[in-house]
Amino acid sequence: MQLANDAVYQTHYNILNVKEDASPEEIRASYKSALLTSHPDKLQHTSQTNADHNETQTRFLEIQTAWEILGDVKSRALYDKDLRLSRQEDVIADEVELENMTVEASGDVVELFYQCRCGDYFSVDSLELGEMGFQLSTENNKISLNAHNSVDMASVVLPCGSCSLKIRLIINSCPHP
Ligand SMILES: [Zn+2]
């Protein structure tokens, strides 16, 4: 089934036959040439079965949709993000231990930061960690993370606030064996 899905699944880039890092000019050019080969009006002179016609219509709509998304910088950026998420191919830039995180406390919430190479930060706070089943404590000015369930070691993947990089925060629930 997975194979069939993959075969059917097409990105907007596939549909316009451009690379995913194509420039706006390249995308526009591909869109225009795709239109030439698919526009229903252009194909009316050829005799077609209904099935062929529907296929042409579908292809035309796919191209239009792809262009509407990829032709606009903002919607393309959003689409790229979705695409990365759907593939889960974000790069784990680093594995980071708790001690390497910058700690900032504001009220009851403790936030952990780690700077990304893009200049923004990977971050997570104690509330989010709590939801994931980890208890962050700052007793005696010493920060520690404990898993609610008894796992010796766990990790949490943190996304960068700006780019697609992620880090893996290694959580060792028994740091002093
Ligand atoms: Zn980044």
Image (tube, rainbow, N blue to C red):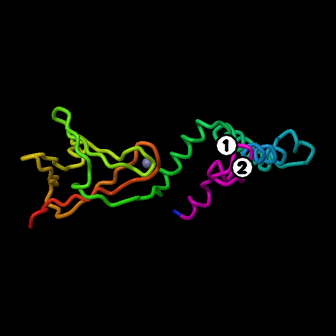
Give 21 or 147, whichever is nearer the viewer.
21
Q: Position of residue 55 (x, y in %)?
A: 75, 48
Q: Is residue 6 left or right of residue 97?
A: right
Residue 62 makes an appearance in the image: yes
Q: Which residues are magenta?
A: 3-26
Can residue 1 be spotted in the picture?
no
Badge 2 amino acid: Leu
Q: Residues within 10 Å of mark 2 (few under 14, many from 20)?
A: many
Q: Which mark is residue 88?
A: none
- The residue to which callout 2 is attached is 16
Residue kind at label 1, given as amino acid type: Ala
In terms of sequence position, does the residue under pointer 1 or pointer 2 come before the other? 2
Q: List the single residue furthest toward the bottom.
A: 177
Element on which disc 1 rests: helix
Rendered location of residue 147, percent (x, y): 16, 54
Who's the residue at 20% across and 49% down the image? 133
Asked if residue 113 lies left or right of residue 86, the reply is left
Q: Which residue does the image show at 90% across and 48% down from the upper left?
A: 47
Q: Residues within 10 Å of mark 1 (few under 14, many from 20)?
A: many
Q: Which quadrant of the view contains residue 105? A: top left
Q: Residue at x 21, y 42 (%)?
A: 126
Quickly name the residue at label 1. 66
Toward the left, the furthest residue is 140
Label 2 residue SS: helix
Residue 98 x, y percent position in the rendering: 23, 55
Q: Residue at x 32, y 49 (%)?
A: 114
Q: Is residue 150 magenta?
A: no
Q: Quadrant of residue 176?
A: bottom left
Q: Residue 82 location, x and y as percent?
A: 51, 46
